[in-house]
Image (cartoon, helix red, strand yellow):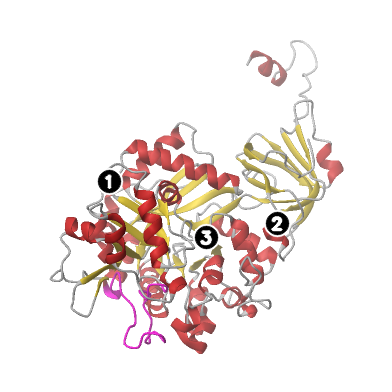
Amino acid sequence: MLAALALALPACGGAPATRPPERATLVLVGGEIVTNDPARPRVRGLAVRGNRVMAVGDEAAVRALVGPETRVVELGGATVVPGLVDGHCHLYGLGASLENVSLRGLESEQAAAALAARAALERAPGEWLLGRGWDQNRWGGSFPTRASLDAALGERPAALRRVDGHALWANSAALRRAGVTRDTPDPPGGKIVRDAAGEPTGVLIDTAMDLVERHVPAPGPEVRERRIRRAAQVAIEVGLTGVHEMGVDDETVAVYRRLAASGELPLRVNAYLAGSPELAARLGERELEPDDGDAYFAVVGMKLFADGALGSRGAKLAADYSDDPGNRGLWVIEPAALREAVIAATGAGWQIATHAIGDAAVAATLDAYEAAAARQPGVDLRLRVEHAQVMTAADVERLARLGVLASMQPTHATSDMPWAEARLGPERVRGAYAWRSVLDAGGLIVAGSDFPVEETSPQLGLYAAVTRRDPAGSPAEGWYPAQRMTLDEAIYAFTAAPAEAGFVEDHRGRLVAGFVADVTVYDRALTPDRGLLDARVAMTVVGGEVVYERAGRAAGRD
């Protein structure tokens, strides 16, 4: 401390002491550095000092900032981007899924039940078997039933969520513990699937899931912390420097807050509370924890649900499902209640993110947002529509005109494309997963994955966005390829757009001098093709600190 002060003060009776030039702590040179700065979209050198970007520019200018303590990374032609952020995911949910049984990718109900039986052998007698990932679309379209789980698990209660999280497969033991019988009415916003005799089949959709899940023992803070730590490690290893954590409870918030305060969160988490009309009415009694640009944890808003999911036919459509006449999906929150909740929450200063997948749900959400904005003219609300999977052309234009953010997940399109047209029909599907339409209308896309619904890596999202193909390369021409993004647009959607959604666009999302040094480094040049899947994350930097570095990385050398 005394030495530092001596450098800053003039020497007694003589000329002022000369301050040595500042040197970078980390320098990356020799590759393509994407800045998101329109004035200099690509540079060859990046210098970091402490937790801030010190300079960007040509190699020679950046190398001039190297000092004896500077770490220099020679990129060898690899690509560097602003820190990637998943704009809609469930980080805590990922941690939970890593501990529970995964039914992802299984091709039959019998295979899923057999896997559940094997997983049960590793658990204590009587312990609930929890899991996620089954998808009836992979085995012909029929929902599973409790009978197969009963045969596999006997009296062990089981609650297994569908891959999208909007339907639950339970066995008879779980239904008995929950008191769900043929006489149990469907709750508002939910559905108990029943057989021809009126008996529950074991599948519960949307709000009906809570009939069973509220009987599952709640995890304690130690379990929540373990799950967050494990999920955060997975996230930084795929290059994520931040996430928008969609729908968390107060118990999980408390654990996040404690980890951030002790410097133990390796990435930034912007959290949205799991919301309801009742909570919206009480938000004026709570304090927001806004993101100041440097924060590792912030509570920035609340998430609501307008409808369910397309895969379980819970998404609310304006016309019948093409493959299920008479069914138009579910309102999880009725439009009038949604409108009042949004007005109350925004009036209390909270940002709102509303899950809306079907075209009717998107329309009702925009109606609510328009009403809220009219109550507060000139206030920058930055309201979000989560997923926005099916939209009319008129609502695409309205979304952009209102300045509503479209929080969309590119891999949803490539996961859903085998059956989405059957749900929607050949005309309505043209307004589904319509990224190009949103961008051309002047809208902002905040990209994410919705993990653990989808895989965690943002590279899969970048690839889906620019190709409209699945990882196997199908279809060769891309699924409705006119809706593709460019690579620059896709990178922006995973970097600068989440910063704007979080009100921190003056701090993060770009690599310019003075901005927070959140950086994702790849091991090769990124190209808008299959090469996006072949690239590997070489280094993840959060706040100027290298929080992940791949062993044997090929992004040049130090």
Q: Which residue is mark 2?
A: 534
Of 252 and 475, which appears nearest the observer?
Answer: 475
Magenta stretch: includes residue 148:
no
Of tags 3 and 1, which is closer to the observer? Answer: 1
> Counting other residues with Cα less than 10 Å from the Cα at mark 3, is it few (<14), some (14-19), or many (20 or more)?
many
**Left or right side of 516 for 316:** left
State the separation of the CA atoms marked 3 and 1.
31 Å
> Can you give x and y, in whole percent of width and height, for residue 70 in the image?
75, 30
> Can you give x and y, in whole percent of width and height, for residue 429 in the image?
51, 83
Eyeballing the image, is 491 above or below 205?
Answer: above
Mark toward the start of the polypeptide (2 vs 3): 3
Mark toward the start of the polypeptide (3 vs 1): 1
**Disc 2 to disc 3: CB gap under 8 Å:** no
Q: Residue furthest right?
A: 60
> Counting other residues with Cα less than 10 Å from the Cα at mark 2, is it few (<14), some (14-19), or many (20 or more)?
few
Q: Which mark is residue 92?
A: none
Magenta stretch: includes residue 329:
yes
Q: Which residue is mark 1?
A: 127
Q: Which residue is mark 3?
A: 449
In this picture, which residue range is highlighted in magenta? Answer: 310-336
Q: Residue furthest front?
A: 151
Position of the C terminus by quadrant:
top right
Identified at 27% across, 65% down, the residue is 146
Q: Disc 2 residue type?
A: Asp
> Can you give x and y, in whole percent of width and height, for residue 505 in the image?
57, 54
Q: Disc 3 residue type?
A: Ser
Name the image quarter holding residue 166.
bottom left
Of 106 and 46, which appears nearest the observer?
Answer: 106
Of tags 2 and 3, which is closer to the observer? Answer: 2
Q: Disc 1 residue type?
A: Glu
Q: Main secondary structure of the magenta part?
A: loop
SS for dot 1: loop
